[in-house]
């Protein structure tokens, strides 16, 4: 099952960042609870509640887990509501979600608090799932739009949270990322890959999601495609801020964590491979869409 697989992926990376037994236990318990909600799709939407206050969680690994697991469960819940006709895909609904994404992206561009920025990023990507579903069901053929955004975000989003956790899990401000290139060059590079993917640049996995939205959105209305391109530009500016701070400024070298870097590298490679070979995504998701 796609949802459980993505949840386990995000949970394993959260566990790898956890620094004490209590955090690991909480992550395991929350993973089990989220899995139950995924198996009861209508209830997944309830995870919007902890998502809105996740930035208050001090432990970074737990913060990451709440964000990513909530995003996956809420996205799958949205798929259920559209499938059952509870939410009806229309051009107007798609435009509404587009405006919401633009507002959140503008907030993310200006936000200085690191956890609030990551929360804004998470919310924007969930809304992209809603936008995809609105367009797909409005044209009567969701196809790959049904699952492609949540699939790609689980990969790139997990990498962003994990990479920042490797180099700055005690930091509070986005500007505190400055100099991380000199702290851990590999972790920094993998985090930049996540930013480029989430910004929707060609050659990375989320661009495949955006391209599917652009082409199918044009069938519904050229305005949707134009709005999608505008949103891609705003998200580029939003994530470029993170990439900029990661690559500049003074810093101090610290001991690398080879195993953690290796698994981060695996996600980074997935972002690139799935971007360069979009047919791989279609093969993976084809039976689900």
Image (cartoon, rainbow, N blue to C red):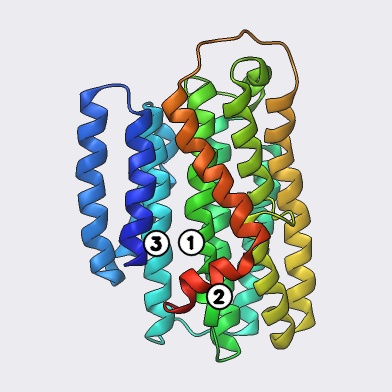
Q: Earlier in the sequence, mark 2 or mark 1?
A: 2
Per the image, the residue denoted by label 2 is 145
Answer left or right for 74 relative to 105: left
Q: Secondary structure at mark 2?
A: helix
Answer left or right for 144 relative to 112: left
- Residue at 55 percent across and 73 percent down: it is 282
Per the image, the residue denoted by label 3 is 74
Kindly report which numbered mark, 3 or 2, lies closer to the viewer in this rendering: 2
Classed neighbour count for the residue bearing mark 3: other residues with Cα under 10 Å, few (<14), some (14–19), many (≥20): many
Whether the residues at callouts 3 and 2 have beta carbons within 8 Å, the answer is: no
Q: Secondary structure at mark 1?
A: helix
Answer left or right for 34 relative to 256: left
- Which residue occupies the foreground of this view, 17 or 69? 17
Vertically, is 233 above or below 81?
above
Vertically, is 31 above or below 127?
above
Per the image, the residue denoted by label 1 is 151
Vertically, is 188 above or below 200?
above
Query: How far across and down, in percent of the image, does residue 164 sit?
Result: 54, 30
Q: Earlier in the sequence, mark 3 or mark 2?
A: 3
User: How many marks on residues?
Assistant: 3
Q: Secondary structure at mark 3?
A: helix
Pick the quarter of the image with the N terminus.
bottom left
- Residue at 61 percent across and 54 percent down: it is 273
Q: Earlier in the sequence, mark 3 or mark 1?
A: 3
Q: Quadrant of residue 74?
A: bottom left
Question: Could you tell me how far apart the alpha carbons at marks 3 and 1 are, in whole angstroms?
Answer: 13 Å
Answer left or right for 26 relative to 230: left
- Residue 119 visible? The answer is no
Query: How far across and down, in percent of the image, does residue 198 sit?
Result: 63, 50
Query: How far across and down, in percent of the image, does residue 85 sit?
Result: 41, 87
- Residue at 50 percent across and 36 percent down: it is 264
């Amino acid at each position: 099952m796609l949802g459980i697989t993505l949840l386990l992926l995000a949970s394993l990376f959260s566990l790898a960042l956890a620094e004490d037994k209590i955090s690991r236990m909480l992550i395991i318990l929350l993973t089990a609870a989220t899995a139950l909600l995924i198996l009861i799709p209508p209830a997944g939407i309830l995870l919007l509640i902890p998502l809105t206050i996740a930035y208050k969680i001090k432990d970074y690994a737990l913060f990451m887990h709440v964000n990513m697991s909530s995003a996956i469960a809420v996205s799958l819940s949205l798929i259920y509501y559209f499938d059952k006709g509870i939410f009806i895909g229309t051009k107007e609904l798609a435009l509404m979600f587009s405006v919401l994404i633009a507002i959140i992206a503008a907030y993310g561009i200006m936000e200085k608090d690191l956890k609030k920025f990551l929360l804004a990023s998470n919310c924007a990507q969930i809304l992209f799932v809603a936008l995809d579903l609105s367009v797909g069901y409005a044209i009567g053929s969701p196809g790959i739009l049904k699952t492609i955004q949540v699939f790609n975000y689980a990969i790139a989003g997990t990498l962003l949270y994990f990479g920042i956790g490797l180099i700055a899990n005690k930091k509070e401000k986005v500007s505190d990322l400055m100099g991380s290139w000199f702290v851990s060059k590999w972790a920094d590079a993998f985090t930049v890959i996540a930013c480029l993917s989430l910004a929707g640049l060609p050659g990375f996995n989320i661009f495949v999601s955006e391209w599917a939205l652009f082409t199918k959105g044009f069938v519904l209305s050229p305005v949707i495609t134009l709005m999608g391109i505008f949103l891609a530009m705003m998200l580029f500016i939003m994530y470029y801020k993170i990439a900029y701070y990661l690559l500049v400024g003074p810093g101090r070298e610290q001991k690398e964590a080879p195993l953690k870097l290796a698994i981060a590298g695996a996600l980074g490679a997935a972002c690139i491979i799935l971007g360069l070979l979009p047919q791989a995504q279609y093969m993976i998701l084809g039976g689900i869409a």
